[in-house]
Image: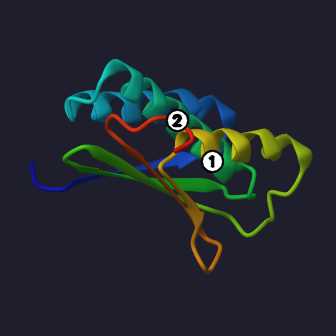
């Protein structure tokens, strides 16, 4: 499969976390990932969206890149620093489940990836 990209624009409101995670899970299933990997991608997408919402954005642009064995996500971030205590658990979860977890150098994009078959925390 060639790399495919799906983009989604979502208001930065908690009520829109479900469509983001469902889209991610559907895309991961379409990449023939295992059930465990699909669940990880679903959780990563939701937590990434929560992180993006905590940055004061009005709208979150989510991009899902699909390649053989990997689902990558990028979430646009607002200009506020999400350093409050409520986002700390999100950071811990993302660091534990993602194969890649980073914020762009300019601070306006959250980048996440999950590889098929990779173990948690490795």
Residue 93: percent from left, percent from top: 66, 38
Q: Secondary structure at mark 1?
A: helix
> Dot 2: within a 10 Å radius of its alpha carbon, few (fewer than 14), some, or many (20 or more) residues?
few
Residue drawn at x 81%, y 64% is: 81
The structure residue drawn at horizontal position 68% and vertical position 49%, both measured from the top left corner, is 51
* Residue topped by disc 2: 120
Q: Residue furthest right?
A: 85
The residue lying furthest to the top in this view is: 35
Q: As rendered, which of 10 and 39 lies closer to the eye?
A: 39
Q: x, y percentage for residue 17?
A: 58, 33
Residue at horizontal 90%, vertical 45%? 85
Question: Disc 1 designates what residue?
Answer: 95
Colour option used: rainbow
> Does the CB distance between marks 1 and 2 fall below 8 Å?
no
Q: How would you rate the neighbour count of disc 1 (Cα within 10 Å): few for under 14, some for 14-19, many for 20 or more?
A: some
Q: Position of residue 41 (x, y in %)?
A: 44, 35
- Mark 1 or mark 2: whose residue is earlier in sequence: 1
Q: CA distance from mark 1 to mark 2?
A: 9 Å
User: Residue 66, percent across and down?
Assistant: 26, 49
Badge 2 marks a residue whose secondary structure is loop
Q: Which mark identifies residue 1?
A: none
Front residue of 22 and 13? 22
């Amino acid at each position: 499969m060639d790399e495919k990209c799906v983009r989604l624009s979502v208001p930065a409101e908690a009520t829109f976390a479900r469509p983001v995670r469902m889209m991610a899970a559907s895309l991961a299933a379409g990449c023939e990932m295992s059930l465990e990997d699909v669940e990880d991608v679903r959780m990563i997408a939701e937590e990434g969206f929560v992180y993006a919402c905590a940055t004061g954005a009005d709208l979150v642009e989510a991009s899902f890149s699909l390649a053989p064995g990997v689902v990558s996500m990028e979430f646009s971030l607002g200009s506020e620093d999400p350093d409050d205590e409520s986002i700390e658990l999100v950071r811990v979860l993302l660091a534990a489940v993602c194969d890649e977890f980073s914020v762009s150098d300019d601070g306006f994009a959250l980048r996440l990836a999950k590889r098929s078959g990779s173990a948690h925390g490795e």
